[in-house]
Image (cartoon, helix red, strand yellow):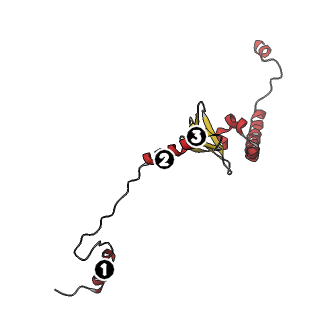
Amino acid sequence: MPAPSPEVAAARAKLAAKFDAVRTGGKGTARRTKLTKHASTGADDKQLQAQLKRLGVNSIPGIEEVNMFQEDGTVLHFSAPKVQASVAANTYVITGHGENKRLEELLPGIINQLGPDNLANLKRIAEGFSAAQSAAGGGADAADEDIPDIGENFEEVSKQ
């Protein structure tokens, strides 16, 4: 049998060095098996609930939506969340499906929730809206020029 090529010899040496460290005993013993840990979210949830119980959080019923305003003008919106609070620990827990939305998407319903820190974002939206209205308004004036004025009562003109 011919001698293996240098590439094959190098690959064999590399494999031998790699698997030498996983033996638990001498040369004839079995390799150790890797233990895999299965991450379960149920245990994490139980631990979280236990810690929240230790803080003394109480559930707050009847909250329809929660909006968290972020620095970049987006809103983290929770609809029908489960809200728990501990006033003594200054801790609020909001559980549910959160969506990132733009401020414009929620605007008519959340004006009363806006604070002074969101005033700049609201001003920016208003300027963009007024610019769009003026652009659309210019087109509306041109359309109004095409319609002739009757100048009289429409009913009287139709009776003649």
Say above or below: 28 vs 37.
below
Q: Amino acid at mark 1?
A: Ala
Amino acid identity at mark 3: Gly
Q: CA distance from mark 3 to mark 2?
A: 14 Å
Tag 2, which secondary structure?
helix
Residue assigned mark 2: 47
Q: Mark on residue 11?
A: 1
Image coordinates for residue 84, horizontal then vertical, percent: 58, 38
Q: Which residue was labeled with disc 3?
A: 56
Mark found first going from the N terminus, 3 or 1 = 1
Residue found farthest to the front: 54
Task: Name the quadrant containing residue 143.
Answer: top right
The answer for how far apart the CA atoms under marks 3 and 1 are is: 61 Å
The amino acid on which the numbered mark 2 sits, given as a three-letter code, is Gln
Q: Locate residue 15, reporting x and y percent.
A: 31, 77
Instruction: State left or right for residue 99 relative to residue 88.
Output: left
Q: Is residue 62 above or below residue 155?
A: below
Q: Secondary structure at mark 1?
A: helix
> If the image is split into quadrants, where does the N terminus sit?
bottom left
Q: Residue at x 21, y 87 (%)?
A: 3
Disc 3 vs disc 1: which is toward the camera? 3
Q: Residue at left 26%, top 85%?
A: 5
Q: Is residue 63 left or right of residue 125?
A: left
Instruction: State the residue in front, 129 or 147.
Output: 129
Marks 1/2 in contact by CB < 8 Å: the verdict is no
